[in-house]
Amino acid sequence: MKTSHAWGGLLNEMNPSIKGLTVILGVILLSLAFDPVTVSISLIYVLSVTALFGRISWRRWLLLFVPFFIMAIGYFWTAALFPRSDLPQDSPLIFSWGPLKMTEAGFSLALSLALRTLMFSALSLMFVLTTEPVKFMFSLMQQCKLPPKLAYGILAGFRFLPLFREELRIMQQAHRMRGIWREKRNIRSMLHAFKRYSIPLLASAIRKSERVAVAMVSRGFTGGKRDFYCQLKIRPRDWMFMGIVLSGIALGYAVSFALGTLTWYGGQL
Amino acid sequence: MASWKLRDIIVLSSLSVVFAVVYLIFLQVGNVLVGFMGPMGYEVIFGIWFIVSVIAAYILRKPGAALLSETIAGTIEVLIGNVTGPILILSAFIQGLGAEAAFAAVRYRYYNTPVLMGAGVGAAVFSFAWGYFQSGFAALSTGLVLAMFIVRVISGAVIAGLLGKWISDALARTGVLRSFPIGKAAAQAAHQKQSSVKL
């Protein structure tokens, strides 16, 4: 499904480094909030920004979001049932079962933790689904001064990925042809199976890397200063976009403050 | 960066690519475990996320290998679509720093089992401090946080330290690492053993 607005692809065309920085700043800012209101307002805001400005496949979005939803449930019940001991003890009880008690204060704190997980994955999905890997590396090289030696080294390694998959498949078939199956479902045989695949895979990765390095050096790659065919620049609208996202988080804080529900990270160690 | 040969960098990043995939698989395992056990689900297997630091540093034996490999693995995870997003690069950097600290503490002279386990512990301690802030562990009871910390340290020492050493040694035995410091060290050790037998 694709959105058909005129500005539907703005997120996709944004400078990857600035987009990444925006997400990191957003995560750090929201790490300070410990109440459900701030986090849920920001969550709704980020979701609408993604929907308005991003051209993404919502099917993939959901597919990637669901595991984090499960994780959020896990965070919720641990934080609700095993809260910090210095929470206000007079807060009304919602539910109790044997020694386990859930108070209102504990419930809202747990809810904020669970929402935080969802919030972080929504922010990250905004980045991941609208950024091309190669452009991200180019932007890191051009905007963040990542050394070209390192950047092209990483890209070379990244290109091995489909080869590894192919090799793994061949290894599996070879093992089956010779009649080797996973013997038993205990730790020992699992470790053995792990070794049977990982060592040959890593060995061939190292051989391939050495060959690629020789090929790159012999073609004159020095890793020194260079110019680029594909140039990525930072435009004013990249900063504007950063402002849009971060002000949404500020809005969350402001609304929560106005409602009197804002809970800061108060140096609780 | 100047002291790094292109070969070392590419070997480092292809190791990181392999382990980025492993990390991604374990993230899914972790998410399911967290659903059942709460945050403790991650702690049990947390050591796996430090393993590339130990392996890269043990093979290449260069200052910066632990930090770089972990950071690259984090970057590659983002490139292949880890939903944790760009913040993961920062988390990986912090974990790498913890592992690097252990190697720096012995001035990059020793790469034996205690040091490799120490690197796993270092990564565990650093990542826990960061996780405390990022995941809001402050909202959990002190006893649970302490238990999580202990489990993560053990996981770092055993999964990253011991399993990492085991994988590297097995890899060295195949002969592909002959031209790397780990292979040279093994050859030297074998030579010394042989000459002492002659005596």
Image (spheres, grey):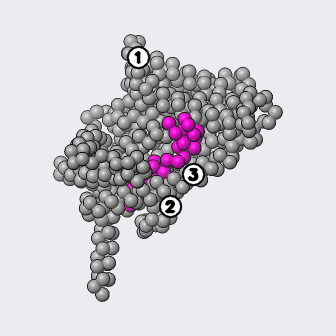
Label 1 marks a residue whose chain is: A
SS assignment at label 2: helix
Is A29 on the left-hand or right-hand side of B117? right
Quarter that holds the N terminus of chain A: top left
Q: Nearer the viewer, residue A250 or A231?
A: A250
Is A22 on the left-hand or right-hand side of B62? right
Q: Amino acid at mark 1?
A: Gly
Question: What is the x, y in percent for residue B145?
Answer: 64, 46
Disc 3: which residue: B151
Q: Mark 3 packing: few (<14 Cα in 10 Å), some, or many (20+)? A: some
- Residue B107 belongs to magenta span: no
Tell me the mark number nearer the camera, choosing from 1 and 2: 2
- Residue B37 belongs to magenta span: yes
Q: Is residue B103 visible?
A: no
Q: Mark 1 packing: few (<14 Cα in 10 Å), some, or many (20+)? A: some
Question: What is the x, y in percent for residue A190?
Answer: 39, 49
Residue in view at x 27 percent, y 48 percent: A180
Q: Amino acid at mark 3?
A: Val
Disc 1: which residue: A8
Q: Is residue A226 above or below residue B4?
A: above
Q: Is residue A57 above or below residue B177?
A: above
Tell me the mark number nearer the camera, choosing from 3 and 1: 3
Label 3 marks a residue whose chain is: B
Separation (CA) of disc 1 from disc 2: 50 Å
Question: What is the x, y in percent for residue B75?
Answer: 40, 42
Disc 2: which residue: B118
What stretch of residues is rendered in magenta? Answer: B32-58
Q: Amino acid at mark 2?
A: Gly
SS assignment at label 1: loop
Label 2 marks a residue whose chain is: B
SS assignment at label 3: helix
Q: Mark 2 packing: few (<14 Cα in 10 Å), some, or many (20+)? A: many
